[in-house]
Amino acid sequence: MRIGLFTNFYLIFIVMVLSLLILLTSHALGTLDEITKAERQKHHSLQLANELFQSSENLTRMARSYVITRDPTYERSFFEILDIRNGKRARAQNYPITYWDENRIASPGTHGNPVALIDLMRREGFSRRELDLLQQSQKNSDNLVNLEKQAFAAIKGWCKDRSGSYTISCPPDRDFAIDLLFGERYKAEKTRIMAPISQFMLELENRTQTMLGNLQSKFQQQIFLMLAVLCGALLVVVVATFYMRRNILRPLDYLSRQASSIAQGSYSTRCDISTRNEIAELGADFNTMAEAIEHEIMKLKQVEESLRERLKEINCFYAIRRGMEAGSLEEVCRTIFVELIAAMQVPSIATIQIELDDRQFISDHLGRDYKRELRKQITVYGEPYGWLAVFYCEDQPFLLPDEQNLIDVIGDDLGKWLEHKQAEARLLVEQELRVRDAAIREFAAHVERMREEDRKYIAREIHDELGQLLAALHLEISLLKSGEDHRSDRVESIRRNMAELVHKADQSVHNVAEHLRPASLGLGIVTALKKLTGEFKKHSGVSCILRLMDEPVHLDEDQTVAIFRIVQESLTNVARHAEASCVEINLWQSANDLIVEVRDNGKGFDSENATKKKSFGLLGMRERAAVLGGSIDITSSRQQGTEVRVRIPRKLTDLAIGPSLSLRKQSIKNLLGT
């Protein structure tokens, strides 16, 4: 049987047995409750019969005590007991078992609801025969009560009238009363009360014993049935356990031992399970798995051998790569010879030849009797540059594809190394060119500063020396005017002409000095630009708008002069070529740069042609910006105007300018020396 089907049947059986046991237990508990209920009913029935007997005894005791003692308490207790039995007064708790006491006489309380004793008997479900016996006993007890009431009337002095009531007054007769309660008639009435009660007890005992016997027999049958079900279930569990041990546990243990054998390295282990369930299928799958594992182990061994070869190749590759980091071409070739031959499958018969740009490198003497050859072309920047070849002098088997891949990788890496070396050489040349370019720019800046210094010197000399001479000459002419009054008209005419010439010479000296070095540059770029734009509007008649930022501008002398000269050259170009009616100059600063824009609405020009023609004005503007590490953008098109934007770094560093100052000075010296 299959394990799944067996498990389902076993589970269904367990559920059915448990359900049956639960049902039988429920019925047994119900039977037990019925037995308990029957016992309780029997006890209560006997209690009611005893109460009837006890009430009769209590009434007799109260009546006799009253007749003897004439104590009204006994009379009151007598009628209270009678009212409780007839349902006219509430019953006391546990009445009559614990309420009355022979040593005391007390009133029987008022707990509970009023109910007649005969009604309580009807509620208990007595049979008709039992109820008739109890009613007969109570009727006899009521007859006895009439005798007791007659004795009470004799004690009080009352006689019976025609209607049977004691309303006629007569002398009290205590002896008659005692005779009534203690005489033979009273005893006969008491005996008549007990006869039905005894018969009731017998009837009740027979009925309850029969009921209890039936219930107990039923309960025993249910217990026997439960035991039978448990025994059957135990037998089935034993059989199922034997089946599981024989067909499931033992094959599983055998399968576990075989799996442990495979885990220990015995991959040829197989299982032989004869059962016809899932364990047999598991054994077949286990055999399939063992075969697959054995096959994979064989493949892994082959892969391990291949990995050893690949590891040699990887070690070879990285050893060659490390040798390329800081070696010459000869050293790199020697490293390739040593490492690549060691990585070959048959290194004892391998020879390597490297040919690079008409240079040959051979690991060993190369004859012409080699049997096999592996070759890789070395390319540098996509162009053939040489060969890397491995030769076998014998016809030995080897892993041609794998070794070819290794040779291809090393050949590609050698080509990249050659590219890197050439790139390093170009970088050195470019760095030298940058150094020379920076030195030239520094020299140009130095020349420009010297030119500005010369201009400043010439302007100062003209202003101080020639200006003073012209001022003295003008003073002498003024003195000549205030001299003799009788001088001739010709002398006066010559004096006026001399004064006019001296004034023009003074104005010319002032203009030359201002052009060479504007005095406003000493007051900052803002003041210089304001004066420059004012003079531009005065001389050219073109509208010029100057927009400045609110923050103060802090520049050194070189930056101030460069910006001023660039704006001056731009305005000169506008006046000469643009035919513009309006020029706009903007000055602001960003986080790192100072930006100056000069825009006009003139006819514009072709900026590309101007660049090709190498306009000296534009070239000078670019050079001035480049010297300060800045840039200049000139945008123009026909009939669209021109825009010149200059961007100057606010703070110059050695990195922005170029190489170090000492290197540039040395380059300048070299240039000057050449």
Image (spheres, grey):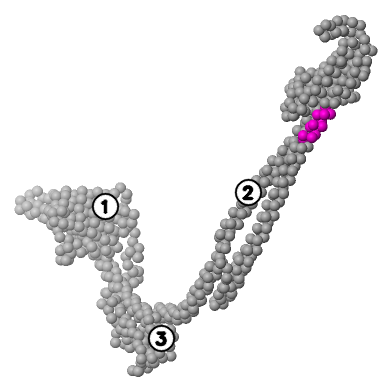
Magenta span of residues: 197-208
Q: Is residue 540 left or right of residue 381?
A: left
Q: Which residue is mark 2?
A: 19
User: The residue tagged with tag 1: helix, strand or loop?
Assistant: strand
Q: Is residue 199 magenta?
A: yes
Which is more toward the observer, 615 or 465? 615
Residue at point 51%, 76% (across, down): 294
Residue at point 20%, 55% (across, down): 643
Task: Check residue 587 in the rendering and tell me which mark sits there, or answer none.
Answer: 1
Q: Is residue 432 left or right of residue 73?
A: left
Q: Is residue 25 visible?
A: yes
Closer to the eye: label 2 or 1: 2
Q: Decide: is 127 above or below 332.
A: above
Q: Which residue is mark 3?
A: 398
Q: Decide: is 411 above or below 134.
A: below
Mark 2 vs mark 3: which is more N-terminal?
A: 2
Q: Position of residue 522 (x, y in %)?
A: 28, 55
Q: Position of residue 208 (x, y in %)?
A: 77, 35
Q: Position of residue 557 (x, y in %)?
A: 29, 59
